[in-house]
Image (tube, rainbow, N blue to C red):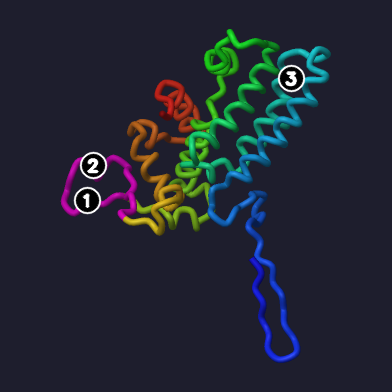
Amino acid sequence: MILVYGTGDWSIIITVSSSIISIGVLFDQYMTLIPQVNNVCRAACLAISKIGRIRKYIDRPTAERLVHAFVTSRLDANNSLLFGLTSSAISKLQRVQNSAVRLVLGVSGHRVNINDLRRNELHWLPVKDRIVFKILMITYKSLNGLAPPYLKELLNTYKPSRSLRSSSLSLLEVPRTVATSTYGERAFSVSSPKLWNGLPQKIRNAASLATFKKLLKTHLFINPTV
């Protein structure tokens, strides 16, 4: 789109971009984040290809460290913004992680069960659960003074109108209305309370970040995101 401003003998032509990069994320005009997903997949696949060239010369622990440094780090960077994306978009990222699993373990072919190998051999959460994990980690930090105050301001403790047992369960209030019907549900102020309230009370009341992280990962392994 091109906007033209001016009067008389002069004018200014402003070209409106369909996307913009902020905090390292490529935001498109419709907030689909598909361009961001494509960029992540492209960079991660390039890293997998490069590591693959030297895989036979390194052992498994070294391969895993390289994958975490150059592949997993890309999949996890700002991944809380990817909550609620279409299954096709998440599948693109999952295929990249599956390739990383094959690379680290040195397996090939279609007969191997990548999900079992990822879970039992590497103890990695799938991409969708890593996104949920990140949001809940941010939520815990926000509620316990370990994150910027502006994040805490987006969360409100649930306060029932009358004395109920739920008032002592460390629940968060879920906003009843959102700005848009398409991506409003993906906002942190909406997704965070919903995910938080779905956790067992034992996890929500964890005494430390390390304990919360351990309990949360175990919970997601046992109860994967559908």
Pointer 2 residue:
166
Picture coordinates of residue 28, whole percent (x, y): 60, 53
Q: Residues within 10 Å of mark 1 (few under 14, many from 20)?
A: few
In magenta stretch: residue 56? no
Q: Residues within 10 Å of mark 3 (few under 14, many from 20)?
A: many
Residue range in magenta is 158-176
Give the mark, 2 or 3, whose residue is nearer the N terminus: 3
Residue 215 lies, with reference to residue 56, above or below; the image says below
**Gap in angstroms between the C-alphas marked 2 and 3:** 47 Å
Answer whether labels 1 and 2 touch (C-beta < 8 Å).
yes
Pointer 3 residue:
63
Q: Secondary structure at mark 3?
A: helix
Q: Nearer the viewer, mark 2 or mark 3?
A: 3
Which residue: 67% across, 49% down?
Answer: 24
Q: Is residue 50 left or right of residue 27?
A: right
Where is the N terminus found, in terms of image quarters? bottom right
Q: Is residue 174 left or right of residue 213?
A: left
**Gap in angstroms between the C-alphas marked 1 and 2:** 8 Å
Residue 86 lies, with reference to residue 22, above or below; the image says above
In magenta stretch: residue 174? yes
Residue 18 lies, with reference to residue 132, above or below; the image says below
Which residue: 68% across, 41% down?
Answer: 39
In the depicted view, which residue is nearer to us: 39 or 122? 39
Q: Residues within 10 Å of mark 2 (few under 14, many from 20)?
A: few
Look at label 1 and name its amino acid: Pro
Mark number for residue 119? none
